[in-house]
Image (spheres, rainbow, N blue to C red):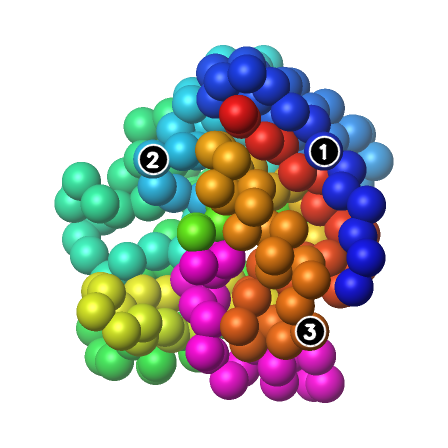
Amino acid sequence: MGVALDLVRGPDLQQVSQRLASDVAGVLRQAVNERGRAALAVPGGTTPREFLTRLGQHDLPWQAITVVPTDERDVLPDDPRSNERMIRECLPLEPGSLVPLRAAGGSLDETAAALAKRVSALAPLDVLVVGMGLDTHIASLFPGDRRLDQARREATPAVLAAHPANLEPRLSLGPLLLTRARWKALLISGQDKLAALNRALGSADPGTAPVRLLFENGVPPRVYFAE
């Protein structure tokens, strides 16, 4: 699969995050102007914090913007590892505007099924910002997950439970919701991540390279790369 990357690159994460925040803010404003509301999915982890902080500094109609994490560990919302906690720290959210991916009793699979109904109402997302691991996972869709190949042929739920080996269980937005976003951005930092992305795009199997799904369906993402 030959892919010409729509690549925005900068010398450091600070500059790239500033550009990404400005671009996302523009897309959100347009979405609210055209449709009255906007839906935004954002990642957690270390790399996106600068972007989220800068996005939170933009004068946006936050009362009309619904935010959902791309994934979440099965931890309490005040846990330092919680993506929900970081999003709340960075964005000036209105009450009720964040849709948390949080277990509320019962099994993680039951929680995913219940959340899928609520999250699917946001589709199509107006803006998706996602990161990528060195193993090319996106959100909490990891290599080896058989549901990734399934997503090529049939609809998958908007929220999935994930049980990656040697990691905490977690909830993740599903492949269909991610790939059908109206505007997508992939934020990566370091030459090793760029090399991993290029290898992934040369693969034929999204089961071994989940990031491929973003490029196979809908509008391909703009890649924001911090050297």
* Front residue of 214 and 119: 214
Image vertical order of residue 80 relative to residue 56, above or below? below
Is residue 146 highlighted in magenta? Answer: yes
Marks 2 and 3 sit apart, C-alpha to C-alpha, by 29 Å
- Mark 2 neighbour class, 10 Å CA radius: few under 14, some 14 to 19, many 20 or more: few
Residue kind at label 3, given as amino acid type: Ala
Q: Which residue occupies 77% across, 37% down? A: 6
218 and 88: which is toward the camera: 218
Q: Which comes before the other along the chain, label 2 or label 3?
A: 2
Q: How many marks?
A: 3
* CA distance for labels 2 and 1: 21 Å
Q: Nearer the viewer, mark 3 or mark 1?
A: 3
Position above or below: 6 against 26: below
Secondary element under disc 1, as helix, strand or loop, is: strand
Report which residue position mark 3 lands on.
204
Q: Residue at x 62, y 85 (%)?
A: 150
Residue beneath disc 1: 7
Q: Position of residue 29 (x, y in %)?
A: 72, 26
Q: Earlier in the sequence, mark 2 or mark 1?
A: 1
Q: In the rendered view, does 201 fall on the left or right side of 99?
A: right
Q: Is residue 186 above or below residue 168?
A: above
In this view, 27 is above or below 104: above
Q: Residue at x 25, y 80 (%)?
A: 107
Residue tagged 2: 46
For the residue marked with disc 1, what is the amino acid?
Leu
